[in-house]
Structure formats: C-alpha cells, structure tokens
C-alpha cells in the first residue's frame, strides 16, 4: 500500500527531474551567465544533456542504494568548481592570447636580445 505509493511518487519525481534538467543547469551556472560570457557552457550542455538524461534514467533504480556524499566532500567539489576551474579557464584564455603576441609582450618571458645596463645580451 503506502510503500508502493511512495515508490511511485519517487519515480515520478525522478522523471520530472530529468524533464527539467535545463532549469537545473541554468540555476547551477547562473553566476557564470551573469558575470561572464559563458555561451560555451550552453554549447557544452547541449552536447552532454542527452547523455546526462540517459544516465539518470538508467541509474534511477540504483541511485537509492548509493551512499550519501558527505557535506565536506560536496563543499570541496564546489570550491574546486568555483575557484580552480575558473582560474584554469583564465589561464587558458591568457595562454591562447599569448600565442598571438610577440614574446616581449608576454609577462615572464625575455626577448631573444635584451639590453641590460647599456650592453646587449642574448641570442644573436
């Protein structure tokens, strides 16, 4: 009786979650859409969304038996997503831009020939 009703309620809730994946995505990445040009995230989401939905549908019965993820792990993952991934994207953008610049314009690199104290040094 009641157990069957609860099980069916959970299945219906899971189906609704899969049907509403786009709004979860928008909510999870809202900060990036507001503060950064994150259209590449939408393109990537369009690519992986069918696979995510398929995985969720296939795993719905086995998800209930998975152990709960501790809060400290969730916090660590969120910190990585919010800080480390952001930093790595900035570095990648900087490096992509650095490929188009001459070596003298990139911080931390020296030109092939440098003048130090009035004397020319470096490769000839």
Image (cartoon, rainbow, N blue to C red):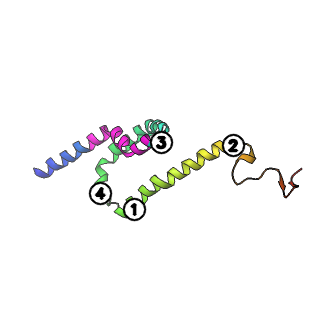
**Which span of residues is magenta-colored?**
14-34
Where on the picture, by quarter, is residue 71? bottom left
- Judge whether residue 15 is colored magenta: yes
Q: Earlier in the sequence, mark 2 or mark 4?
A: 4
Residue 49: where, in percent of width, then height? 41, 39
Q: Earlier in the sequence, mark 1 or mark 2?
A: 1
The residue tagged 4 is 65
Nearer the observer: mark 1 or 2; the answer is: 2
The residue carrying pointer 2 sits among few (fewer than 14), some (14 to 19) or many (20 or more) residues within 10 Å by Cα, namely few
The residue carrying pointer 1 sits among few (fewer than 14), some (14 to 19) or many (20 or more) residues within 10 Å by Cα, namely few
The residue tagged 1 is 73
CA distance separating discs 1 and 3: 26 Å
The residue tagged 3 is 36
Q: Earlier in the sequence, mark 2 or mark 3?
A: 3
The residue tagged 2 is 99
SS for tag 2? helix
CA distance separating discs 1 and 2: 37 Å
Residue 51: where, in percent of width, then height? 41, 40
Are the residues flagged by discs 2 and 4 in contact, CB closer than 8 Å? no
């Amino acid at each position: 009786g009641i157990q069957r009703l609860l099980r069916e309620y959970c299945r219906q809730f899971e189906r609704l979650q899969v049907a509403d994946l786009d709004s979860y995505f928008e909510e999870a990445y809202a900060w990036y859409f507001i503060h950064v040009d994150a259209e590449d995230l939408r393109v990537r989401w369009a690519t992986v969304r069918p696979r995510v939905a398929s995985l969720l549908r296939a795993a719905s019965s086995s998800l209930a038996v998975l152990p709960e993820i501790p809060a400290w792990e969730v916090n660590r993952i969120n910190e990585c997503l919010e800080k480390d991934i952001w930093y790595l994207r900035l570095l990648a953008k900087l490096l992509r831009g650095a490929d188009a610049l001459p070596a003298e314009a990139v911080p931390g690199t020296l030109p092939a020939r440098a003048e130090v104290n009035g004397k020319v040094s470096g490769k000839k």
